[in-house]
Image (tube, rainbow, N blue to C red):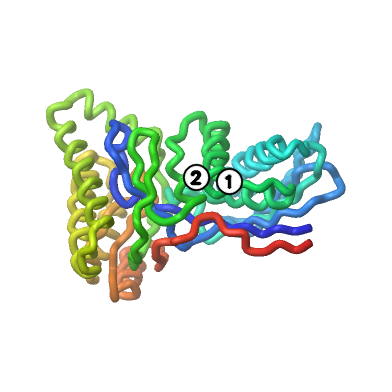
Amino acid sequence: MRVIASAPAKIILFGEHSVVYGKPAIAAAINLRTYVRAEFNDKGAIKIEAKDIRVPGLTVSFSENEIYFESDYGKAAEVLSYVREAIELVKEEAGRNNKGITVSITSQIPVGAGLGSSAAVAVATIGAVSKLLGLELTNKEIGKLGHKVELLVQGASSGIDPTVSAIGGFIYYEKGKFERLPFMELPIVVGYTGSSGSTKELVAMVRRTYEEMPEIVEPILVSMGKIVEKAREILLSDLDESIRFERLGKLMNINHGLLDALGVSTKKLSELVYAARTAGALGAKITGAGGGGCMYALAPEKQSEVATAITIAGGTPMITEISREGLRIEEVIL
């Protein structure tokens, strides 16, 4: 038996950094996907093949007393701990710990870009392996298991990434609670700087600034929270699409300015943001922790122009849209 499952990447639309201080955030799944194929093997071991994860390939076998690397290329190794924990967790849930399982991963999501590649691979692995083992789980339950994987690997996690990847669409998050917002099309372009910042270090840097100058930073965080609430109001409204696009774009531009004020933007991120706006994007901002990683632009009828501008500015553009679906079972071969 063979099962193929896929799960999408995510962007933080609004609320990064302020979410750390109890403010809400809105995230959304985007149509860049990680695909995981799962099948039994007769070796009783977990074998992970990561042959196309936007970095060179890697194949690793785990068994009771050995880890065998066929090749090892940098960032690709980061996915392994998520995949292994995901497999172990599902085997435990299904009560079938003696089964050898091979998973093969291919992905459209760059690793380390702040687009939730680790959560997507964990969610897709849980989806494929649970189906393989005959465990019937809802997407919501798979999102919760994905959160558990992140906690096991990272030690801390809000659960935003695996929840968005598992159930898709728009998610409003506040203090540990999730609300799914109505779906709307958003023609976006993601621009990748090619480097990544450390979320931990950037959060700590904002914390230091906050502690040094709370009277300055607190109003910025409050404004960020209000931007999220305004964006939620727009997504819930029945305004014409063009008006919603225009207002969301304005909020993106304001949110980017506030993130820049906190010191989490970089020269490269700002270049991509301003290149996108100059090319006709209604709004553009950092998505995620900053310090590198990605920005995104809202570009109705201007996606190709914005993508070209991002390329000229030295970034890697990804034309995409919001993914209505989260985890998807692509194929089951008995």
Residue where numbered disc 2 is placed: 162
Please give the label number shown on residue 164.
none
Number of numbered callouts drawn:
2
Amino acid type for the residue under numbered disc 1: Ala
Residue at point 41%, 39% (across, down): 198
Residue at point 49%, 60% (across, down): 325
Question: Local crowd at mark 1 within 10 Å, few (<14), some, or many (≥20)?
Answer: many
Q: Secondary structure at mark 2?
A: helix
- Residue 161 in picture, x, y percent from top left: 46, 45
Amino acid type for the residue under numbered disc 2: Pro
Q: Left or right: 218 with respect to 2? A: left
Residue at point 22%, 60% (across, down): 249
Residue where numbered disc 1 is placed: 122
Instruction: Tell me, yes or no, whether the two marked residues, 1 and 2, touch with CB atoms within 8 Å.
Output: yes
Residue at point 76%, 40% (across, down): 62
21 or 309: nearer the viewer: 21
Q: Secondary structure at mark 1?
A: helix
Q: Is residue 227 above or below residue 328?
A: above
- Residue 293 in picture, x, y percent from top left: 39, 50
- Residue 127 in picture, x, y percent from top left: 62, 50
- Residue 269 in picture, x, y percent from top left: 30, 53
275 or 239: nearer the viewer: 239
Which quarter of the rendered picture does the N terminus lie within?
A: bottom right
